[in-house]
Image (cartoon, grey):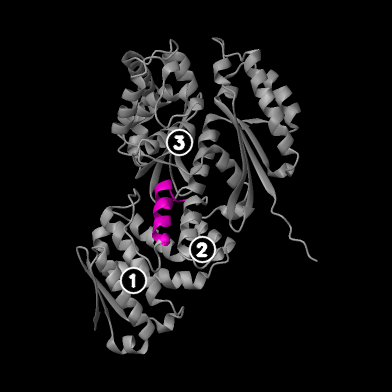
Amino acid sequence: MSQTVSSPLYAAIDLGSNSFHMLVVRHIDGSVQTMAKIKRKVRLAAGLDENNALSKEAMQRGWDCLSLFAERLQDIPKENIRIVGTATLRTATNVGIFLEKANQILGYDINVISGEEEAATIYKGVAHTSGGSGRRLVVDIGGASTEMIIGEGFSAKALTSLKMGCVTWLERHFKDRQLTATNFDNAIEAAKSTLAPILDSYTDIGWDVCVGASGTVQALQEIMLAQGMDEVITHAKLKRLQKQAMAAERLEELEIEGLTLERALVFPSGLSILIAIFELLEIDSMTLAGGALREGLAYEMVDELRQEDIRARTVASVQSRYQMDVTYGEQVASLAQYLFEQAGAEEWVSEPQAGILLQTAAKLHEIGLTIDFKKGGEHSAYLLQNLDLPGFTRAQKHYLGELVRRYREQLTSLPEQHAVSGTSSKRILRILRLAILLTHRRNPDLVAQVKLTAQDDKLTLNLSKQWLEANPLTAAELKIESNRQTDIGWPLNIECL
């Protein structure tokens, strides 16, 4: 009996100023599968004294953490391991003492990277895991440094590492643990002063979208979602959260819905830095990136993953892993796109995500059939909402799940979602259902010549009379579909050409 050779493991370790992280992944079917995430709050930056020497206590916390990581490294090929130290280890005057013992514990040398190297690796992590086109501004607020990068595709055009972070700003501006307006103002103004030298050059280069990476931005998004907001970070939402924080008066009393106890200590300082970035660079909105430093280290070890279209890579990987009918998925996607363009795609020019999400749903709607036919839609929804899908945001995954949940038979209105506008949301679902229904024979040569027109919520689908007579089952299903959509307030007329 032949044995399947398991995929090799890769490990990326990031010795950060606030936390030490270990990411273990494997390369499978053109994508990366996370096997383990291990995190320990070490607060290394808090152990720096006025002379930038690390205290023995801080070093011991770090060594204790690395003793845990060392066990897992024994299972991973040496060439598949990357270990880096960042801002605090760059700053510490007695870093040699820490590294000597740390290297012995791990059995591997730690590479203390420069601020520019850290920024470049963060950008690679974002590029490998986040969808979208155009120029990106990437913001990563760490414990002792903040990385600011502008890039396009896999190429960074500007890389900066600034000496401010949520731990150092905590010790500098919230040392008295008072959540006063004065402390917040001082922290925000100090961050603006630190940012000022790069303002002109970054503004000159410009960007199309802004994404945030790592702990501070992730914590903010989790808070917003817990409080019923959408996933897009705006200046107004940041100021709203500042007011919530100031209501507590003291840091020890800080309680905000969605904020974990683990993150509470450095939340006000990280929030202050982000507010400063939004105000000084006049940022309209920010979303959370799919990865950062650790993902950059891990993905760069696998040459095959360097693909410009992250979403296309993700879809292909899912299709392969779940043995999906790729040819049929392309057929549905092609017809859906054709109908999409006929039904007034010019109205959605300002919403390019709509077409991308329709294409993705068309290619992946049958994923649930790998589990069961009867509840295929439910299984499809669960998988797409819970799989790691690099290139798609949390809101987009939720929306994709709700689309494929309704791809056949029973039709219900979509729940609240934040991926696309309400108008686009309904129309995408209606077009997806029609494209699937019209291609059910899975043969491109048998698909009808169709025309779809839209007037507000009213859709009219025109087909030839001869084709409808030659395909009585499809004709009957189209009549049922017309009734289903019309009954929930989405008029659909089926007419002969």
Q: Secondary structure at mark 1?
A: helix
Which of the two discs, 1 and 3, labels the residue nearer the N terminus?
3
Q: Which residues are magenta?
A: 390-405
- Relative to 186, 14 lies left or right: right
Whether residue 314 sits left or right of residue 351 in the image: it is: right
Cα gap from disc 3 to disc 2, whole angstroms = 29 Å
Q: Mark 1 or mark 2, which is nearer to you? A: 2
Reading the image, the residue beneath label 3 is 218
Task: State the residue in front, 76 or 88.
Answer: 76
Q: Quadrant of the N terminus?
A: bottom right
Spatial CA distance of label 1 from label 3 is: 37 Å
Q: Quick check: 44 above or below 112? A: above
* Image x and y of residue 132, in percent: 41, 51
Q: Is residue 396 magenta?
A: yes
**Quick check: is 305 in the magenta stretch?**
no
Residue most extreme to the right: 1
Q: Report the amino acid beneath label 3.
A: Gln
Check disc 2 and report the residue beneath it: 367
Rendering coords of residue 55 (x, y %): 62, 13
Magenta span main SS: helix
Distance from Cα at disc 1 to Cα at disc 2: 23 Å
Image disc number at residue 338: 1
- Crowding around mark 3 (Cα neighbors within 10 Å: few <14, some 14 to 19, many 20+) is some
What amino acid type should be assigned to the residue bearing mark 1? Tyr
Query: Mark 1 vs mark 2: which is more N-terminal?
Result: 1
Q: Give the x, y percent position of residue 379.
A: 50, 59
Q: Residue at x 37, y 71 (%)?
A: 435
Q: Nearer the viewer, mark 1 or mark 3?
A: 3
Circle 2 sits in a helix, a strand or a loop, which is it? helix
Residue mark closest to the camera, 3 vs 2: 2
Residue 132 can be seen, yes or no: no
